[in-house]
Amino acid sequence: MTKNDEINKKEAEQMSAAWARLEKQLQASEQSPLWEQWEEQGKHAAEFNKETTAAASAAHTKAATAQTYPEQMQANAVPLGRARASSSPAANKPNKSGAVGRWFKRNVGKTIAACAAAVITVVIATPSTNEALAAWLNTFRMDNVMIVQQNDLESLMNSFMKDGETRETVNRFGTFEQTTVGSWSKMTVEQATKELGFAVPTLTVPEIQLGAISSMSAQTIAFRLNVDEINSAMRKLGADKLLPKSVDGKAIEFNAGQGVTITYEPKEGSTSKQSLWVEYIKQPSIKMDPSVDAKDAYEAIIRFPALPDHLRKSLVQASNMENGEIPFPLITNEKPEKIVIEGVDVYLNQSADHSYANAMWLKDGVVASAHFNDFEDKQKVQSLIAELIHP
């Protein structure tokens, strides 16, 4: 047994009791009827997830039909805690907790990594070097993409955990709450065009046609950090710069805007198995209390010894404090290829057999994530991406 196997085994044992308690708590929770569908779709998606995962994309199966994609996309918006509100009546129907618990357990690595990325990012704050701007600029745009390896985030989080402590108990470092605004619903081409602000792409692939279009809900995650606990852990890890007390208990909001999912499916009677879907989401932003001493918080994170050097450099390079810009973390287990298409930086991943690919880009305040099934020709994938990049 390798050292990694031993670590994984130990972690699994530590987490088993926590999952049992979590599933018990979920017995009384009100859950969406989509849970069971996500559970079934997740089984098919597991094979591809072994090769590549991204923070911006949920797992999808090659065998799923185009009609299931819009509902499946809601897996990206599953509550990390219990959502405060939902405008969908169906979402308030009670359902079995088993699928919920299994979903969390299967996706814990991705969920924890996303939280860790958000925690790292939220402390990259106001442009304190410019006091005039700092007085009002407390909302920060994610204008640049930064590649973040999931194992780096896992290691960073594990460094804060005591021996025998599970991730569930690390809430001593603070609390977070998720709010969902809006719900999944089918859309017409006209509605999607109005929501997007640009025309729904028409692709030049003879074998496929426009399929279903749906809306995606907006998400807000509010963090409140326990500075004493965080600083205690940082101090033990050798930090010479700690988070300022002004951060303690203050609301730090991560906002992901509403989005639109568009699917393209094989034409009726076609023998082609090619299909793709793309989601366009309004650019995420982070908002924090203006009383937070942002300059000290930023320096504490940048100087934190447990932060990998390459991640530290990426944070510094991708942040533009003067303009209120912070990096958008693209979390992955792979090394996506960065290519320029239509003047836009695109981050592309392909499966080992080139039968599946996903791509992500950020343009004009919109984050786009596209997923391609059975397009083995890399040049064809890039050509389609060019058509999906809005003008």
Image (cartoon, grey):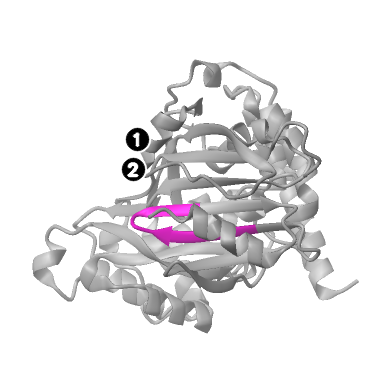
Q: Is residue 23 left or right of residue 200?
A: right
Q: Residues within 10 Å of mark 1 (few under 14, many from 20)?
A: few
Residue 182 percent across, percent down from the top left: 41, 29
Q: Secondary structure at mark 1?
A: helix
- Give SS at disc 2: loop
**Figure label count:** 2
The residue lying toward the viewer, choosing from 237 and 187, is 187
205 lies above or below 52 = above
Residue at left offset 36%, top offset 75%: 300
In this view, which residue lies farthest toward the right? 1
Instruction: Quickly name the residue at label 2.
Output: 197
The residue indicated by pointer 1 is: 194
The answer to whether residue 24 of the structure is visible from this angle is no
Give, as a single range, the part of the protein colored magenta.
358-368
Q: Residue at x 63, y 27 (%)?
A: 34
Q: Can residue 146 be seen from the camera position used here? A: yes
Q: Nearer the viewer, residue 57 or 138?
A: 57
Dot 2 surroundings within 10 Å: few (below 14), some, or many (20 or more)? Answer: few
Name which quarter of the figure residue 155 lies in: bottom right
